[in-house]
Amino acid sequence: MPMGYRLIIFDFDGTLADSAAWFRGVFNDVALRYGFRTVSAEELEAMRGQDSRAIIERLGVPMWKMPFIASHMRKRVAQDAHRIPLFPGVEAMLEQLQARGLTLAVVSSNSEENVRRVLGPVASARIRHYACGAGIFGKRSKFRQVLKAAGVRPNEALSVGDEVRDIEAAAAEGIATAAVTWGYATEELLRSRAPTLVLTRLDELLHAVAA
């Protein structure tokens, strides 16, 4: 493989799972429950151009509340998993990557149970390593965990995600980064963090790791 990748590490929400509509639908309920500012649909869309730290500050969410909010969101996903689809083509893409001999992993703030449920039995079985339940800024240690479990050096791995925190955490471990434009963050914001690759379509990932 020209880039030397042996391991592809996926984010889940906004990268493999099209959870944006679900997220928009529950956002203000969660805001009212945990005492931070509700937003209009227009403001929620505008926040796609900001990174996680800026969004937390904008909404006035104390950092100590973040683990409780994350736990609540995982429970909500567990209840609504049937309403969260994969992006079209994800199952075929995972199949093709596995067929090329690549090891696949998921690093996510969501729970492993939720990730497996949304992926379904066939696609979830293609994922060799799961490192889930990451804190909002806790993905770096999860990347390190996956590298060790897979026996892969950082320069042999590619992280695929849709948020600035995915790029930052992977890059901090020396892992190449592919930013996808179909998720939560805008393409402009993602490009501002200089990822290794910017992907606008699923099939571009297949081309990037093609033999």
Image (cartoon, rainbow, N blue to C red):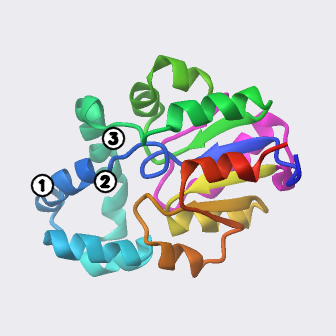
**Where does the C terminus fall, quadrant-wise?**
top right
**Outermost residue toward the top?**
121
The part of the image, by quadrant, that contains residue 176 is bottom right
Identified by mark 3, the residue type is Arg
* In-front residue for pair 64/146: 146
The residue drawn where x is 66% and y is 53% is: 159
Residue 201, image x, y percentages: 54, 54
* 122 is higher (above) or lower (below) than 116: above
Residue 125, image x, y percentages: 58, 20
Circle 3 sits on which residue? 74
The residue drawn where x is 43% and y is 40% is: 88
Mark 2 or mark 1: whose residue is earlier in sequence: 2
Residue 79, image x, y percentages: 23, 31
| The residue stretch that appears in magenta | 127-156
Helix, strand, or loop for circle 2? helix
* 117 is higher (above) or lower (below) than 159: above
Circle 2 sits on which residue? 20
* Nearest to viewer (mark 2 / mark 1): 2
* In-front residue for pair 55/13: 13
Circle 1 sits on which residue? 29
